[in-house]
Amino acid sequence: MKSKDKIEESVEYILQNKIKKCDLGIVIGTGLGGLVNTVNIIAEIPYSSIPHFPVSKNGNAKLKNYFW
C-alpha cells in the first residue's frame, strides 16, 4: 500500500470517529498529560486504534490523540 493510501485511510478513520472539524489535534504521551485539563476536548482517540499509526516501542499504551 502506498504512503498516500495509508494516510488517507488514517484520515478516514479519524473523520469517522466524531472528528468533523477541530481547531487543533495533538498527540499526548508523557509529560503533557496535564494539558488535557486546560482545554475543551471534543474527541479522544487511542493512538493504537488508528490504522497505520506506528505502535509505541517504549510500551506506553496510553498514547491518545486529543482534538479541540
Image: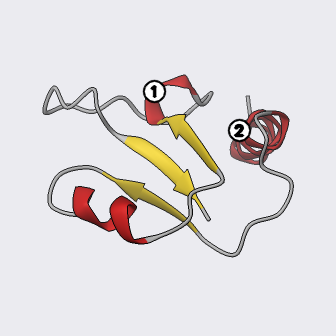
Characterize the local packing of mark 2: few (<14), some (14-19) or many (20 or more) Cα atoms within 10 angstroms. Answer: some
Dot 1 falls on a residue whose secondary structure is: helix
Residue 14 as seen in the image, left or right of residue 48: right
How many angstroms separate mark 2 from mark 1 (CA)?
A: 11 Å
Q: Amino acid at mark 2?
A: Ser
- 51 shown above or below 5: above
- 7 shown above or below 33: above
Name the N-terminal-most of marks 2 and 1.
2
Residue 13 as seen in the image, left or right of residue 33: right
Q: Amino acid at mark 1?
A: Ser
Number of disc labels: 2
Residue under circle 1?
A: 48
Q: Position of residue 39 (x, y in %)?
A: 48, 70
Disc 2 + disc 1, Cβ < 8 Å: no
Q: Position of residue 63 (x, y in %)?
A: 33, 39
Residue 45 as seen in the image, left or right of residue 22: left
Characterize the local packing of mark 1: few (<14), some (14-19) or many (20 or more) Cα atoms within 10 angstroms. Answer: some
Residue in front for this viewpoint, 32 or 37: 37
Residue in front for this viewpoint, 41 or 53: 41
Residue at the image position 82 percent from the left and 43 percent from the top? 15
Residue under circle 2?
A: 10
The quarter of the rendered structure image containing the N terminus is top right
Residue in front for this viewpoint, 11 or 16: 16
Residue in front for this viewpoint, 57 or 27: 27
Residue at the image position 36 percent from the left and 29 percent from the top? 55
Q: Position of residue 38 (x, y in %)?
A: 38, 71
Residue at the image position 38 percent from the left and 60 percent from the top? 36
Residue at the image position 76 percent from the left and 33 percent from the top? 13
Q: Position of residue 10 (x, y in %)?
A: 70, 38
Which picture quadrant has residue 64?
top left
Dot 2 falls on a residue whose secondary structure is: helix
